[in-house]
């Protein structure tokens, strides 16, 4: 049986993966395995780091995201989310009780004015193994997107195809994406409001062609904590000039709504995310998800004596006649 980052045989092996292993008490500077950035030293930083490591650890454990011997390809765009994901994954590589490799991969989409030197410089200075995959998906996206439409659908499809294919080329067994809890919630509401479906981003997914396992280790992490962490770590953030420059994106509108809710009702987003993990198919209306037709055959009757039932009905009828 393969050793995994789950609770399997927890009572039999002292070194099984446990999210509680990733606490500040266990933090060492050499947790960063080969790369030695200038780390913040404030109490606030260590408190936040402890929280992030705990949440990522729980996500990895809950969804069995990483197994012994895995080669995890971390997709890094230069944004705060992917930097944070890579940073935490490198720490886990050092302290996890199993062996797995981490490699960073960036897709250079040939966007105009993209600072091509930023990511290689950061990765090399911090001794992080990486690949830069160069494909001009920018021009294709511009050409295939109708006038007045956003680039998201075409861009994401081309990006996925390029990255998933490259994962196969380098022998990656898992593809790690930087989507966080708020991304998952935004996708849920986008599908609810504009797609007529109840679906979001799963923390773990088998790709459509069944060749890649996608994982989202930041699934339990709030965006506001990632923003704080990225600022403390001073990551060299690269802004997105392809889709981020388009106004009135539906996802941006949803994100504003979520942020407003979080300010006015701090527990609401936590409750909504909890609902995604607590689905009752019988209380919805999806006939593919729940077989409503068999309910009649499952009903349990409290059989009574036929004569007694007739007498009860006669009493009811008499009562109604009197009224």
Image (cartoon, rainbow, N blue to C red):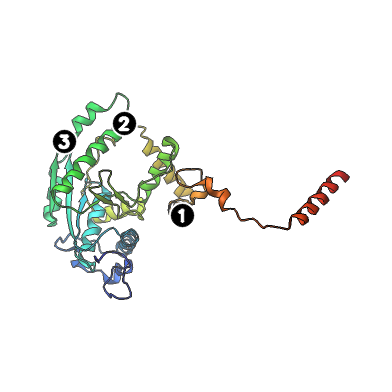
Q: Is residue 236 above or below residue 112?
A: below
Q: Which residue is mark 3?
A: 110
The answer to whether marks 1 and 3 mark residues whose Cβ atoms lie closer than 8 Å is no
Of residues 108 and 157, the one drawn nearer to the viewer in this rendering: 157
Q: Which residue is mark 2?
A: 150
Q: Give the image location of residue 220, x and y in percent.
A: 36, 55
How far apart are labels 1 and 3 at the CA level? 42 Å
Give whichever of discs 1 and 2 has the lower sequence position: 2
How far apart are labels 1 and 2 at the CA level? 33 Å
Q: Which residue is mark 1?
A: 278
Q: Give the image location of residue 113, x and y in percent.
A: 17, 35
At a point 37% along the width and 51% down the height, the residue shown is 181
* 149 lies left or right of 274: left
How far apart are labels 2 and 3 at the CA level? 18 Å
Q: Give the image location of residue 227, x and y in percent.
A: 31, 51
Give whichever of discs 1 and 3 has the lower sequence position: 3
């Amino acid at each position: 049986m393969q050793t995994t980052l789950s609770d399997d045989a927890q009572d039999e092996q002292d070194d099984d993966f446990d999210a509680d292993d990733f606490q500040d008490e266990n933090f060492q500077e050499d947790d960063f395995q080969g790369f030695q950035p200038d780390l913040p030293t404030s109490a606030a930083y260590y408190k936040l780091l402890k929280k992030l490591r705990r949440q990522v650890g729980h996500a990895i454990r809950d969804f069995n995201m990483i197994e012994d011997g895995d080669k995890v390809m971390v997709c890094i765009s230069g944004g705060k989310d992917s930097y944070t994901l890579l940073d935490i994954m490198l720490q886990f590589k050092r302290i996890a009780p199993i062996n797995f490799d981490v490699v960073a991969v960036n897709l250079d989409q040939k966007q105009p004015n993209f600072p091509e030197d930023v990511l290689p410089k950061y990765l090399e200075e911090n001794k992080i193994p990486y690949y830069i995959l160069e494909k001009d998906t920018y021009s294709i996206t511009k050409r295939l997107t109708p006038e007045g439409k956003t680039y998201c659908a075409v861009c994401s499809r081309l990006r996925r195809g390029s990255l998933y294919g490259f994962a196969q080329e380098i022998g990656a067994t898992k593809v790690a994406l930087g989507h966080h809890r708020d991304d998952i919630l935004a996708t849920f509401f986008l599908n609810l409001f504009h797609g007529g479906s109840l679906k979001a981003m799963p923390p773990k997914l088998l790709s459509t062609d069944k060749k890649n396992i996608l994982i989202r280790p930041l699934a339990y992490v709030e965006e506001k904590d990632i923003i704080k962490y990225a600022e403390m770590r001073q990551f060299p953030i690269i802004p997105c000039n392809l889709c981020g420059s388009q106004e009135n994106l539906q996802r941006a509108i949803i994100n504003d709504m979520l942020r407003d809710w979080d300010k006015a009702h701090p527990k609401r987003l936590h409750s909504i995310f909890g609902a995604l993990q607590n689905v009752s198919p019988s209380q919805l209306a999806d006939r593919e998800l729940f077989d409503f037709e068999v309910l009649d055959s499952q009903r349990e009757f409290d059989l009574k004596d036929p004569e007694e039932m007739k007498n009860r009905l006669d009493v009811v009828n008499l009562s109604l006649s009197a009224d």
